[in-house]
Amino acid sequence: MPTKIALIDFDEELLESSRTELERRGYKVRTATDGVAGLQLVEQMQPDVVVLELVLPKLHGLQLCARLRKHPDLRARVIVAASPTFAIDIRKARDMGAASFLNKPYTTEDLARAVKSVESVPVPHNEIQRIAALRSYDILDTLPEKSFDDLAQLAAIICETPGAMITFVDSDRLWFKSMVGFVANEVPRELSFCAHAIMHHEVMVVEDATKDERFAGNPLVSSAPKVRFYAGSPLRTPDGEALGSVCVIAQEPRSITDQQRQALRLLANQVQLLLEWRKWMNKRATTSTAATA
């Protein structure tokens, strides 16, 4: 079954050229020229991907994003198309769960890459169990901890990269426990390299993201922080559930040595040991509190 795409933009000429190109590539496409019609289209079509302009008549793109996020039956991945001058609105759209972004004006090739990027995000076959395992560690949205921060710093030093992170792949976001050279609390899961890394048992390496069809249309690649290189070792529970990764990034194409790959694996093991210790301490504290109550 072809991927269904809803295009919502006031520019009818752009809609027509985009529709023609995407249909040529095998997608099923429908269009709307204002926010209200766009919402109706999405509710009727139940698309896999929505591409929308922020400055829409009748219903602003941000309002439409909010409606889509709250709709219980919609699972579409949203690509926001806007001028870079709307940076604040773009950040708001990202907070509302937008999966990717296109800078206007864009070419039909740019659009096709963005669609390919968001539809290629993999989901593990045991996703329900994986998320339950992640939640059992009570690590999400916790404050920074030096023990984790030190391991992220060590990853950057060993791999000689400007950026390193300890991440956790939640149901709809990538959350950062520790980071070096990157300022964010989280990004949508659809934008994350780590969502791909957890599908692997070994270190995943992307030497040049601009040449990898999974990431070439990713706004973290095409705009700040302009990630080119990524290497990540998955974090796995004793039962084998993938929680996230220890990863490093750089803004230029490169690779890592076999020794650096091994170091990332060992650091991931140490992070998992920290998680197990932390979980045990939390359980012990809860038991002690209950005993004294």
Image (spheres, helix red, strand yellow):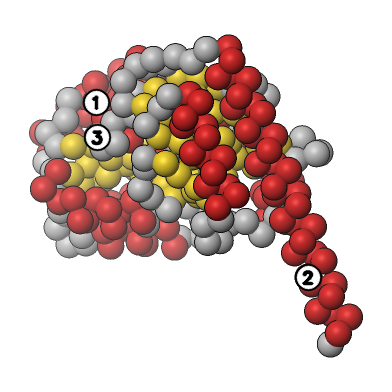
- Give the mark nearer the N terminus: 3 vs 1: 1
Which residue in the rendered view is the most extreme toward the bottom? 293
**Residues marked 2 and 1 touching at CB (< 8 Å):** no
Q: Is residue 162 left or right of residue 156?
A: left
Q: Nearer the viewer, residue 83 or 279?
A: 279
- Give the mark nearer the N terminus: 2 vs 1: 1
| Image position, residue 48 (x, y; %) | 44, 39
Q: Helix, strand or loop at disc 3? A: loop
Disc 2 residue type (three-letter): Ala
Q: Nearer the viewer, residue 172 or 142?
A: 142
- Give the mark nearer the N terminus: 2 vs 3: 3
Disc 3 residue type (three-letter): Ser
Tell me, for residue 110, which label it has, or none: 1
Q: Quadrant of residue 27?
A: top left
Q: Nearer the viewer, mark 2 or mark 1?
A: 2
Q: Nearer the viewer, residue 70 or 279?
A: 279
> What's the distance in space between the residues labelled 2 and 3, CA to CA?
44 Å
Tell me, for residue 223, which label it has, or none: 3
Q: Residue at x 18, y 50 (%)?
A: 87
Residue at mark 2: 285
Q: Helix, strand or loop at disc 1? A: helix
Q: Is residue 191 above or below residue 196?
A: below
Disc 1 residue type (three-letter): Asp
Q: Is residue 73 above or below residue 31?
A: below
Q: Residue at x 34, y 16 (%)?
A: 253
Report whether residue 51 is seen: no
